[in-house]
Image (tube, helix red, strand yellow):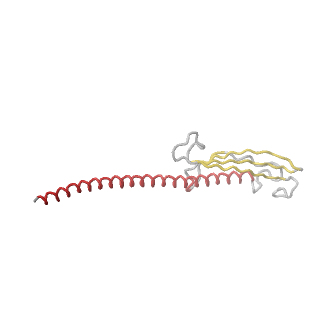
Amino acid sequence: RAMNLHVNSRRHRSSGFSLISAIFLLVVLSALGAFMVMFTGQQQTTVQTDVEGVRAYYAARAGADWALYRALDPDNTIAPGSSVFATCPTGTINTMGGSLSPFTVVVACSSSDYDEGGRSIRVYEITTTACNNASCPAASPVSGYVERSIKLTAAKCKDPTAAAPQFQCG
């Protein structure tokens, strides 16, 4: 009988050790799971912000293309046969379609006129800023705010003595 008590006493001590090991393992696995959930959430937010940044870039580029087309007047509809140029296009574009619809694009432009040997040259400096906020650019950006800007310089030359209909410099 004495031997039987000794075996039961050992088994009782080792079962306490198993309980402590199981609790430790549960705590470590729970911490690892919480870290994985947090890391996955941050990664998803980063990917979503990157996609919004690309969309903002293309919205700004669309605004720049619009402004450039208006400024350079490729159909020469503004005062054909003279040295008059299109005015600097400016404004806010809120009506982009498709995946660019949540973006507001602000177009700013300045121009300088030059004369070279009887030819008139106008240099346009166009800046477009696109953001996913109604007031663009935002004074105090909030979480999820994305903004991209494009700045370009273009020049147009008109020669009133050139042949119609384009009156472009040669």
Picture coordinates of residue 154, whole percent (x, y): 75, 52
Up-down: is 27 above or below 141? below
Is 50 on the left-hand or right-hand side of 35? right
Residue sitting at the far right: 117
Residue closer to the observer: 21 or 105: 21
Horizontal and vertical percent for residue 99? 55, 56
Residue at 28% across, 53% down: 20
- The number of callouts visible is 0
* Image quarter in which the N terminus is found: bottom left
Residue lying at the far front of the rendered structure: 2
Tell me which residue sits at (30%, 53%) in the image: 23
Residue 37: x, y in percent? 41, 54
Residue 165 occupies which quadrant of the picture? bottom right
Asked whether 18 or 126 is in front, the reply is 18
Measuring from the top left, give residue 66's x and y in whole percent: 67, 53
Quarter holding residue 110: top right
Q: Is residue 69 left or right of residue 44?
A: right
Quadrant placement of the C terminus = bottom right
Residue 36 falls left or right of residue 115: left
Q: Which residue is drawn at 54% across and 46% down?
A: 145
Q: In this view, does 157 lie to the left or right of 64?
A: right
Which residue appears farthest toward the left when viewing the image? 1
